[in-house]
Amino acid sequence: MKKIKIFAIIGLIATISFLNSCGNKSKEHTEEAKKNIKEANKELKEATKDASEEIKTKATTDWQKFKLESEIEIAKLKKQSNDLKVKIEKISGKERERLNIQFSKLNQKIDEQQNKLDKKNAEIEKDISQINDSITINMEEFKSEFKHDNKELSDALKDFFKDNVK
């Protein structure tokens, strides 16, 4: 009976040792997995940051290009407007009054375009650190609308002296 107790105790010690060593291996695997997860999270954060910086840089560059092109377009509109002013000066009477009213409206629209561009630029510069997809989409919508409005103004200036009454 004493031998059975000794074998049982030895068996119990061996089982505890075996389970303990398995537990250590399991703990090692758990620790290694945690370490791998931390490294993966760090790499993901870095990749996200890099992508965000790339988006921000591209959006900033695109906006600056658009702004410059728009300012050039507005300058052209103002020059066309000044050329019209000279032509209007040569006309007399009621026709001159009518043309001056139209001319004032066109100049007001050009000024509104300039103000719209300045206002949007201020918003973009304020939010540049937070550029994301929604702001980029908003910028693209603004660009499209702004270009359309400038085209209409340009056409209106070109057609200024045409008689549109049928």
Image (cartoon, rainbow, N blue to C red):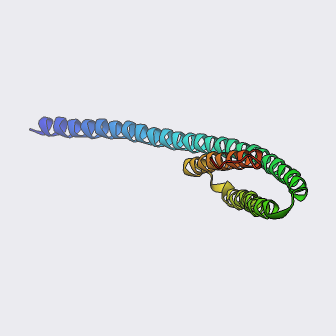
The answer to which quarter of the image holds residue 20 is top left
Q: Report x, y in % for residue 71.
A: 80, 50
Name the one closer to the observer, 150 or 157: 157
Q: Which residue is drawn at 18% across and 38% down?
A: 6
Report whether 159 appears left or right of 26. Answer: right
Q: Report x, y in % for residue 150.
A: 70, 48
Report whether 47 appears left or right of 104. Answer: left
| Total numbered labels | 0
Does 145 sit above or below residue 26? below
Q: Residue at x 46, y 43 (%)?
A: 34
Does 5 sit above or below residue 79? above
Name the one closer to the observer, 163 or 108: 163
Name the one closer to the observer, 10 or 91: 91
In the image, farthest residue toward the left: 1
Q: Residue at x 67, y 46 (%)?
A: 56
Q: Report x, y in % for residue 91.
A: 87, 57
